[in-house]
Amino acid sequence: MSLVAELDHEAFSPYGTAEKLETFEARYQAFPQGFVVLDLDGEIAAYACSEKWLTNREPGLDENPLEIHCANGKIFCITGMAVRIKQRGNGFGLMLLDHLIETARTEKCEKIVLETTHAQGLYFKRGFYITNSREDRGVRLDIMELSLEQHG
C-alpha cells in the first residue's frame, strides 16, 4: 500500500491534496473490491479506490472509510484515482474509471460522486457533471457526480 501512497503523493502533492498511507490501508480494508491497482512491468502505473455510502454527501480528504463505508450503501464514492506522470496519455485513467463505474453498477449503486482538483475533463467524458465547488487545503475542489439510473 505504500507504493499507492507514493503514487498519490506524486500526483497530488503539487495541489496539497495527497493523502496519508493509513487512509489507503483503511480504504482497502473497508472495500477491497473497490480498490484497483494497475501494474505495468512491476511498477504501479495507476490506482483507483472507492467506497459506498448510505446517504448522498460531498467527499472529504483523508476521511476514515472504516467509519463511513457501508456495504449496503447506494452512493458510490470514488475516493482516489491517479496515473503515474510518465504513464499519462495511455488511457489508463479512463480504463480505471470504466472499471469503477462497472463496479458501482455491480454493487447496485444509484449514483457515483467524487471530488477533483484538475481531472474534470476525464470525468466529463463519461457523463459526470459538476454539482458544487469548495476550497480545502487552499485548493479548489469540484464535486462531480454521475447518476447510474439515467446512464445504466
Image: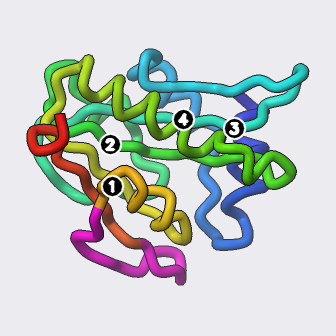
Along the line of sight, the residue nearer the viewer: 102 or 21:
102
| Kind of residue indicated by mark 4 | Leu
Residue 96's label in the rendered image is 4
Asked whether, in this view, residue 125 is left or right of residue 12, the answer is left
Question: Toward which corner of the image does residue 47 lie, by quadrant?
Answer: top right
Where residue 65 appears, as percent x and y from the top left, is: 37, 35
Nearer the viewer's eye, disc 1 or disc 3? 3
Q: Earlier in the sequence, mark 2 or mark 1?
A: 1
Q: Which residue is mark 1?
A: 59
Q: Which residue is mark 2?
A: 77
Q: Tell me what residue is drawn at x 50 percent, y 58 percent.
A: 122
Give the secondary structure at mark 1: loop
Q: Are marks 2 and 1 in contact (CB under 8 Å)?
A: yes
Would residue 146 be found to the left or right of residue 139 on screen?
left
Q: Position of residue 97 (x, y in %)?
A: 47, 40
Give the spatial CA distance, label 2 vs label 4.
Answer: 14 Å
